Amino acid sequence: DAGVTQSPTHLIKTRGQQVTLRCSPKSGHDTVSWYQQALGQGPQFIFQYYEEEERQRGNFPDRFSGHQFPNYSSELNVNALLLGDSALYLCASSRGGANNEQFFGPGTRLTVL
Amino acid sequence: AQSVTQLGSHVSVSEGALVLLRCNYSSSVPPYLFWYVQYPNQGLQLLLKYTSAATLVKGINGFEAEFKKSETSFHLTKPSAHMSDAAEYFCAVRLTGGGNKLTFGTGTQLKVEL
């Protein structure tokens, strides 16, 4: 049983560019959450998708947007990249929308130059 | 607002010694509490969770944590450290009825020395 997978593993972009990160949830899971983990910090909640809709959102600007597809996979898009967006982006999946254990993927390391 | 404080960004112990990683939370309602471990270049793995059942929670790899409401603490312990325990540990809180959003502490890097 494959766990949560994320692509790409690493990504280098320049300021002002746009980036799309992808996540496939664990089999049987229908809810996807995204977190940003800056160097030396704990993960910060960006948003959560369930039934193809954004259900909860953390304190992130509108430059951060997402999407969930009918097969439950998800994308995180970041526009107008800033140096401060450099971080490890973690995807977590769970079952049933809320209040169930989240399983984390290995993350995508984004570097903005 | 809920938050989590982890005391000590770096903890070093000898192999075979007690591991104690500290976590205090602030929440206006009884929370769910979690400990996650992160190995280099990997995602987070759940060690254990408190969901208002038993206050002493046992997790994987010999770790356990005790929920103390009076101290608003949820410290992680392991009686005997192993070299393979070297990793970063995160305490997290989730509000009951507040969806699935986790709020993490800043993490504690555990070093295990021979």
Image (cartoon, coloured by chain):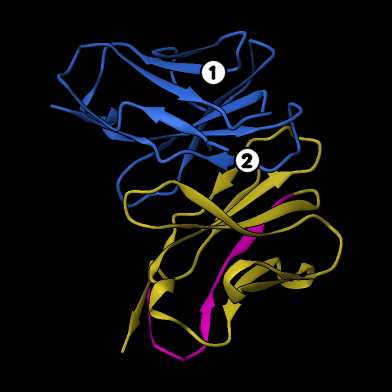
Residue under numbered circle 1: A73
Q: Which mark is residue A104?
A: none
Asked if both marks, 1 and 2, belong to the same chain, the answer given is: yes
Give the image location of residue B113, x and y in percent: 31, 85
Q: Secondary structure at mark 1?
A: loop
At 68% from the left edge and 43% from the top edge, which residue is drawn? A101
Label 2 crowd bin: few (<14), some (14–19), many (20+), radius 10 Å: many
Q: Which mark is residue A102?
A: 2
**Residue B51, magenta (yes or no):** no
The residues colored magenta run: B11-27
- Above-or-below relation of B18 to B104: below
Figure chain in blue: A
| Image quadrant where one finds the N terminus of chain A | top right
Amino acid marked by disc 1:
Ser
Q: Earlier in the sequence, mark 1 or mark 2?
A: 1
Q: What is the tally of numbered marks visible in this picture?
A: 2
At 58% from the left edge and 41% from the top edge, which residue is drawn? A103
Give the image location of residue B90, x and y in percent: 50, 57
Circle 1 marks a residue in which chain? A
Circle 2 marks a residue in which chain? A
Amino acid marked by disc 2:
Gln
- Above-or-below relation of B103 to B75: above
Figure chain in yellow: B
Q: Quarter of the image holding residue A68?
A: top right
Label 1 crowd bin: few (<14), some (14–19), many (20+), radius 10 Å: many
Label 1 or label 2, whichever lies nearer to me, is 1
